[in-house]
Every structure is written in C-alpha cells, then in structure tokens.
Amino acid sequence: MKKQYFILSREDERARFSEPTGDYSPFELGAPLLDLDDETIRKIYYFRLHTYCKHIKNTPAGRVVTEFLPDVGWAGKYNTICCPAGHHFYEGRWFADSSFLDDYARFWFSPEGAPRLYSFWAADAVWALCAARGDFSLAEGLLDDLIANFRAWEADHLDESGLFHQIDDRDGMEYSIGGSGFRPTINSYMYGDAAAISKIAARLGRREDERVFAAKAAKLKELIDSTLWDGEAEFYKTVREDGAIADVREEVGYVPWYFNIPGPEKSVAWKFLFDEKHFKAPFGPTTAERCHPGFMQKFDHECLWNGPSWPFATSQTLTAMANLIDRGDGGEFVGRGDFFDLLSTYAGSHFLTENGVTVPFIDEDLDPFDGHWIAREELKARGVYDRGVDYNHSTFCDPVISGLCGVRPREDGTLSVLPMFREDQLLYLCLDGAPCLGRFVTVVWDRTGGRFGRGRGLSVLVDGETVGRSDRIERIDVRL
C-alpha cells in the first residue's frame, strides 16, 4: 500500500483518540493526521473525525452517511436526510478511502433517495469530491441524474423572476427572522449546481448541456447580485415573494461566497461578522444579527434560527471566508488571522460540561453567549435524551484542511497551499497525509524550526518529497 504519512505517527494518534467509532475508523479510512500548538483545534479535529465515522452506515443500498445517530421520524430511507449531505461530501473527501461517498452519491439518485426534501447542493458537492481526488468519473457517471435533479427543482421552486423560492424550514433553518422566499441559500446552491453541471458536461464533450447550464449559472449570479443584495445594508438578504426585502442581516448572507459568486465589491459585508452589534459572540457567530428586535425571540420549538449559533451555518461561513481569502478579495475586511479566530471560536464551542466533567461534544444549536446546547436542554426537559449527540450536520475537518492548512486542488491539476493564519498565531502546524489529486500532501509550518526538523517556515511535501518552501506564510502552487 502506498505510504501516506511522512512526519506524524498514526499509532500515536490512535492511542490518544481511541473511543469506539462503529463500523468505521478514521485511521482505517486514512484520515490526514494533524499536529499544532492549539490543543483545542487539534482535539476537536480528531473528535470530529470519529463522530463522522459513526455515521457511515452499511445498508442494502450501499453505504450512506446519516445526520442523526438515533432514527428520527422526518428522515428518509436508512435514516438519511439530504439537508447536511453537502457537508458530508466536503468533509468526507479528505479520507484516503472515500469510496463510501460513491455509494452515498448514487444512493441519492436511486429510487430510495429523496434529494429534494431539503435544499441540497448535490452537484457542487459531488464535483468538490471529484476535484479533491483528481478523478471525475463519479460525477461524469451521475451527470444525467444531476441534470434531472436540477430540472425537478426548477419545476416546483423556480419563480418567473428567475430566482428559486424556498421555505426556511426546508432549508433546515426554521423560525428564521428573514423567513421564506427567495433566500440566499437555495439560490446559491442552485448556482453552484448549475456551474458544476456545466463543468461536468464540458468534460464529457456535451456542449449543449455545458452551454445551457453555464447560462443558468450566469443568470442566477446576476439575480443574486441584483435582487438579493441590499445595497443600503451592504448585505445579501432574503426577498419575500411579495417583493419585500427582509429587514435583518442573517448569517445566510455569507453563503454566496461558499460558491464564489460575489465580486470583490461585495466584500464589505464581512465587516459585520466580527462586530458585536451584528454577528460576533463568544460562541458565535449568531445566525441573525444581534441588533434586530427579533433576535433570540422565544418560540415553542427547540430548533430556532433567529440568533442561536448553528455549526451548520458556521461551517458554511468558514468555507465562504476561506474562498474569499483564497481569491484575495478580503481587502480591509477579513484576512488569514480572522479565519483563524473564527475557527478557534468554533472549536471552543465543541464542549459539554456535566457533573463537573467537560468533554468534546457536538449537538444541534447552541446559545451564542454561554455555549449551552439549546435543543439538548429543551429536549431533556421533555424527557427526550441525546437525540443530537455526535450530530453530523456540519463540517469541521474540511475547514481545517482546506482553510487553516490551505490545501486546495485546482481543476487544472495544480495543488495550491495558502494556510489561513498569521505567523504569530501558531508556533507550529503539521497536516500529514491529506489525499489530493491522487497524491498525499503534507503541510508544515514551524516558526523556529525546532518541532519537525524541516527547518523554519512553511514547507509543502507531496508523497514525502519537498516541493515548495517559504520563510513566511504565503501561497505555494505546485503542478501535480
């Protein structure tokens, strides 16, 4: 078997993080190893690898990935729910053996799958998986299914304006302040899917499909920028079907950057993320801005999107921010250090303290000010326990690998590495054995040169061979 790790020891990591994981182990699947002098990020990285693997299930239809460990009444076949499935593909693409995602992708377009019960960026997620592999055969084989899925969305969600409408609950974001209508979420997802379908079609020489879906993506981009952008508020917002624009900034306004839709002139929106009047909170970001009178309004429901912090949304925001920084569009509003700060806040929210004992933990929504898990507490009061334990509704390892460590495969076969932290924020970091474009990538940052024996600064290795070095953190591009 091809060697995967060149600096860190798998056995050391196995010994430190050895809790049961069900049928699959992150080490047997070939997860990249991580060492850095931020113990919270490191601990949660391995915790999230283990929790993800608990959700890989063997079924008669092949392997699938679940959102909840216990069965829930609103799930589909095999307890699957498409709402977080895009996150599942982005997170799972970094296992050396990600073949379970081939089964999972095909499942959604089988007679047993239900890929439109919730909003789901299906084609984009499959494309992201294939781009990391450098092998697009899965996407090419699913092209007709992805086109049929897109057209089915058009049949019942596309308005004559050219925008898609969605109920906030079907975005998985019930009780939002902005409510239902032409939301930044569904329209960005459909843009991402159209763009991905066009690229898959191009690979197969299907020029008419390439042209049609490129045009659909272009039209959606124009409408998102012209209709969903509130110039006065400097933010993307939901527009209700009566044409009224929501009077609130919500975290979903950052979703267009997840799909690289906005131009640099829209980057001003990011000034609100780290402002305590808007989204910043000790366990945030909040899902709605704090200055709105509807912020954290109480309803008789455990899952609210009117202010509580949701890992689902934080994941999207981190990926969106990483895209912005990678493109060099952050300007005065956001930079590498800001990415590290938000990731650190996110990592610090992954804990539960009970009976004086604090353990790594992930559940549904959490209070952005004290970090307690809201749905967990409310369900316990009703006699329902542990519905959301090890909840698989978000990413963590993907923003660590593609953001913090900066590992990004380009569609032309180039590996691009731009770690997203300032030199003074970490003394050392090593990501070892990230599968990328059919090779294994190692990223090393060592401020003093005393940790890994590779000298000072930033090094990028491919299959154990150094292919790029710098004394400081800057982009290193390598053609593979």
Image (cartoon, rainbow, N blue to C red):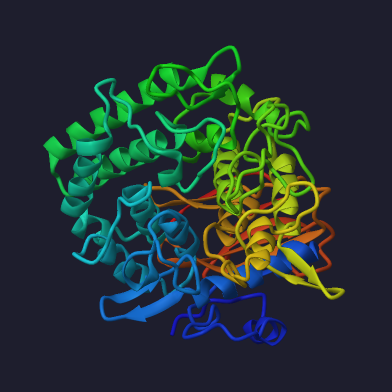
Position of the C terminus by quadrant:
bottom left
Among the 4 quarters of the image, the one containing residue 354: bottom right
Position of the N terminus by quadrant:
bottom left
Among the 4 quarters of the image, the one containing residue 261: top left
143, above or below 439, in the image = above
Among the 4 quarters of the image, the one containing residue 456: bottom right
328, above or below 227, in the image = below
Q: Nearer the viewer, residue 340 or 152?
A: 152
| Number of numbered labels in the structure image | 0
Horizontal arrangement in the rendering, residue 356 relative to residue 181 (left or right): right
Q: Nearer the viewer, residue 429 or 454?
A: 429
Residue at position x 26%, y 76% in the image? 61
Q: Is residue 68 visible?
A: yes
Q: Nearer the viewer, residue 317 or 211?
A: 317
Q: Is residue 99 visible?
A: no
Q: Nearer the viewer, residue 74 or 370?
A: 74
372, above or below 189, in the image = below
Residue at position x 38%, y 46% in the image? 119
199, above or below 95, in the image = above
Horizontal and vertical percent position of residue 68? 49, 68
Most extreme residue toward the right is 356
Horizontal and vertical percent position of residue 248? 60, 25
Horizontal arrangement in the rendering, residue 267 relative to residue 211 (left or right): right
Horizontal and vertical percent position of residue 184? 46, 32
Residue at position x 72%, y 83% in the image? 16
Horizontal and vertical percent position of residue 212? 18, 32
